[in-house]
Image (cartoon, grey):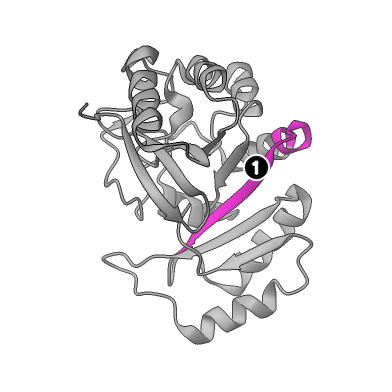
Amino acid sequence: MEYKHIKRIEDSEHFGTYLQIDLFKIKTCTFNCIHCRAGPTKNQIPQRVFIYPVNKILKEVNDNIERFGKVDYIKYSHRGDPTLYVLFGKLNKEIRAAHPDIKIATCTNCSMVDREDIFNELSKVDLVIAGLDSVLNEEFQKINQPLEKINLEVLLQNLLHFRENYNGRFWVNTVLLKDFNDSDQSISAMKSYLQKLHPDNYLITFEATDTSELISQDFKIKLVKAFVDAPFDVQIGADRP
């Protein structure tokens, strides 16, 4: 069977063996992040969309597990924000019913977690990985290039509300870019916010762009010192989840 929606990943740093699910034909997101490995956002919209029926994706998941064995996780990919798929909740229910012993993980920018349907669907996922590159608006605008209607302060408050009501594993991932979000002010502000958010794990990953070099080793040491007393697990220089 040729797989159009899934890819099997073996022995990853964060998820062991997992199936990666792509939900969109083209990258669909509320952000247009300058560091996104999927490239520019072709479909930057503030609403949910229907692309593929659930049964087509589930058929590939079932076939792969039957042929190659169980996985530790089923995880939605970075090719857009998975919560914009209008059948996100239904697909998770079908996967859970077919494979109750496999955990489900998703990345999301959390920009639409104020919607009741998205809030409820995310709440039923085993692991939510929130992408948060900066809590300072100027940096947020430069790095994430969100839709105009997205307000960072509102997003941060909505994320706190979600975290207070979520019982699964909750990670935060920051992509650190030299000369974009690596100032002392940015790091201090992020730490202060995370102390209120209480993630289970904070992952700092490093990227270079056309206008930004990789972070230096000296700066990595500085980060270790900055987060040494953080009341949550911190992984500096980790692979992107």
Left or right of residue 124, residue 61 in this image: left
Q: Is mark 1 on a helix, strand or loop?
A: helix
- Judging by the rendered image, the residue that carries numbered circle 1 is 156
| Vertical side of 201 occupied by 52: above or below | above
Identify the image quadrant of residue 84.
Answer: top left
For the image, the number of numbered tags is: 1
- Residue 192 position in % (x across, y down): 74, 60
- Residue 132 position in % (x across, y down): 55, 50
Q: Does the magenta stretch include residue 172?
A: yes
Q: Name the kind of residue labelled 1 in the image.
A: Leu
- Residue 224 position in % (x across, y down): 64, 77
Identify the image quadrant of residue 46.
Answer: top left
Task: Name the residue: 51% across, 39% down.
Answer: 73
Farthest residue toward the bottom? Answer: 218
| Vertical side of 189 occupied by 59: above or below | above
Left or right of residue 123, residue 106 in this image: left
Task: Name the residue: 78% across, 36% down.
Answer: 164
Left or right of residue 43, residue 187 in this image: right
Residue 218 visible somewhere in the drawing: yes
- Residue 149 position in % (x across, y down): 48, 31
Q: Which of 53 and 81 is in front in this view?
A: 53
Task: Name the residue: 60% across, 51% down.
Answer: 172
Left or right of residue 5, residue 16 in this image: right
Task: Name the residue: 50% across, 55% down.
Answer: 138
Q: Nearer the viewer, residue 189 or 50?
A: 50
Farthest residue toward the left? Answer: 2
The quadrant in which the N terminus is found is: top left
Please provide the residue range marked out in magenta.
161-176
